[in-house]
Every structure is written in structure tokens, then in C-alpha cells.
Image (cartoon, coloured by chain):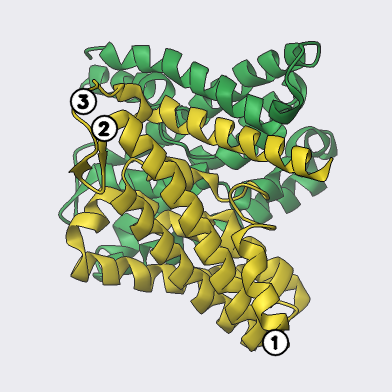
Chain colours: A green, B yellow
Amino acid sequence: MDLGSYITIIISTVFINNFILSRFLGLCSFIGVSKQIGPAVSMGAAVTFVTTMASIISWLIYYFILIPYHLEYLRTISFILVIASFVQFTEIVIQKKAPSLYRIFGIYLPLITVNCAVFGVAVLNTDVFFFAGKAVAGSFLKSVLQGFGAGAGYTLAMFLMAGIRERLEFAKVPRCLKDVPITFIIASLMSLAFLGFSGFKI
Amino acid sequence: MKLLGEFIKGLWRENPTFRIVLGLCPTLAVSTSVVNGIGMGVAATFVLVGSNIFVSLIRNIVPDKVRIPCFIVVIATFVTIADLFMKAYTPTLSRSLGMFVPLIVVNCIVLGRAEAFSSKEPPLKCIFDALGMGLGFTWALMLISAIREISGNGTIMGIYVSKSFEPPLFMILAPGALLTIGLLIGAINYFTAKRNR
């Protein structure tokens, strides 16, 4: 067990390969929900929870069901179904057991079902941590960490963008660039800043 | 005539990329070269047409409560077909698109059309709607990838446009994609506002 490689995974998924700013996963919700800091962070927390759980579930399915029976080609169908039902299940449980929590981020859960970031992290895990039908060493923990890191990176980008957009309300933006286009342009500048991290040698 | 209208609306008036701003993840991620853009557009169009016909055929059988999971399974099936087909016949393209082929499943355009259109309309209409949306997506993707490939790499479809300038690399990296789409949507808003005035 070498601790360094696990820390590397977290740092690289949060900063170097930030899910929104350099992989373009989860952009729809990034543009849609990043108008205020409060909702943006709640959405980020919900996504982090779901990406972590989706990594665990998809790893279990891939390792114990798909590989032994040579069903790797069913990856897309099985992952999306399991993720969708997991999200629905979580929504129902939270609604029943913790209504106050549900009010904070429950409303974002249905949005997450078709969030590319969640499905993307499941696919990415199997692409990176499985080699020619075999799991690489420590792949379970690495998948979970990558899932968590993806969610954390998503939350970070959401938080930064929401902070900027709150201030943008008072700025004089040309009318044709209002709202969506200016958000893209700001995201582009943020992404340029995040490119700086790719010089990291770890 | 009505069918033609369903076809044409996806090309411009309800263009999925520029007007409804849906399905952005693949649009931005694969638009580094025109070839990738076309490949992604064709794959997405295939999935759209196939799943829209199928969803439309089963629209009266599926109970309302479980319709979303059912639609997702139909879409995932067509995505798997497209993925395997591309792996077999266009392996280079499939490699350069990478994980974005399976990601068509969560492309909002596909599920959006299934939910908003084909779960209510007969199959023939859905074919035209899906073709229009698919081609609208494809040309948007081609436009964005052409801009990025010319400015970031100095080539179009692999052929050099001009060797007299040093292309700024950032245009084919992540920031270039976001900048291109932001300015394009801005330009479209500007011209639409001008014409309406």
C-alpha cells in the first residue's frame, strides 16, 4: 500500500483534471445551478455523495458480475440503470427519514440521474483501473477516491463560479452576452487558470 | 409538409446546442477536430433516431411512473450498439472519442426528446424530429470543431490551412472550447435581437 498514489488521485481529480473545467462533465448543471452560492454548494454536496456511491456500486458490479461472466459490453446499460435506481432510492429514503436534509439538497437529486459527471466517473473508473479484464492493485479504493475527488472538484468549481456570478449581477454585461454566454466565457478563464495545475509533477 | 416542419425546426429554431443549450458535455469535449465532431454527431443522430422510434412505439404500453427508466434502457441499448459498431469499423475514431461514446446515454438531448416529443407522438413524426435534432447537433458540432481546429491547430480535417501563423494551443485545450461556445451563443443572441428589432 503506498499512500502517495492515493493522494495523487485526489489531487489530480480535484485540480489537474477537474471534472467540469477540464473534462467537461456535468456542464449542464454547472451552468444551470450556479447562480447563487447556497444552492450551488448543496448541489455539489449531493453530487459528491452520489459520485462516491456510484463508484462503489459500479466497481462491485463490474468486478463481481460483468467480468466473471464476460459481459463487459453491458457496462453502459447496467451502470446507468443502477445509478438511476440508486438515486431514486436515496431520494425516497432522505424524503422519509430526514425531511430537513431533503429540503436542502433533495430537490437536486432527480437532476443528478442524468448528470454526466456521475455516469462519467463510473465509466472512467473502469477505463483507468481495469486493464485487459483485470483489476489493477488497490482498484477499489482508487475508484472510491476518484469518485470522491470528482465530486469535490465539482463542488469547488461550482462554489467559485457561484461566487463570481453573484457579483456579476451588478456588472454591466453587454445584453447579448447576458446569463449563459458570459458564464461560458468566465468558465473558460477559470479553466485557463486551472491549466496551470497541469504543470504539477506528482 | 408538416413532417418537413418537424425536421427543419431542429436545424435552427430549436437547435439543441445553440438554442436550448443541451448536451454540452460531448459538444465541448470532442470538438477538438472536425473528424471527431462529425463522428460524434453521426453517432448521436443514430442513437436519437433509433431510440425515438422505439420510445414512440412503446409509448402506450409503458406505465407513466416507470417511463424514465424504460426510456433510459432503450437509449442505453442503442448507445451500446453504436459503441460496438464504432469499435469494430472505425477503431481510430472510437479511440479518440473515448468515453464520450458511452456518455451519449446521459446526453440531455436524447432523453429530452424521448420525454418531450416521442413519448407523445406517432413514430413517423418522431423520425423526422430526431433526424432534425441530430443534424442540428451535428452541424453545431462541426461549426465549433472547425473554429477550434483552424485556430488551435491550423488545420481543417487534417489539411493545413495556413502555415504562416503559430496557432494558439489553448484553443484545442479545454478553455478554447468554453470560449468558443460562449462567443458563438453571444453572437447568435446578438443577430437574433437585431433581426427582431
Question: In terms of secondary structure, where does tag 1 sit?
Answer: loop
Which of the two labelled residues, at mark 1 and mark 2, occupies the earlier sequence position? 1
Q: Quadrant of residue B71?
A: bottom right
* Local SS, label 3: loop
- Quadrant, the N terminus of chain B: bottom right
Residue at (30, 56) in percent of width and height:
A63
For label 1, the residue is B122
Q: Which residue is mark 3?
A: A1
Are callouts 3 and 1 both on one chain?
no
Give the CA distance from mark 3 to mark 1: 58 Å
Type of the residue with mark 3: Met
Marks 2 & 3, CB-CB < 8 Å contact: no
Report x, y in % for residue B95: 23, 52
Counting from the top left corner in percent of width and height, residue B139 is at 48, 56
Q: Nearer the viewer, residue B127 or A165?
A: B127
**Badge 2 element:** helix
> Which residue is tagged 2?
B153
Say the numbered circle drawn on residue B22: none
Q: Is residue B113 left or right of residue B162?
A: right
* Callout in the foreground (2, 3): 2
* Residue A167, placed above or below residue A18: above
Decide which of A138, A75 is in the foreground and name it.
Answer: A75
Asked if A10 appears above or below B157 in the picture, the reply is above
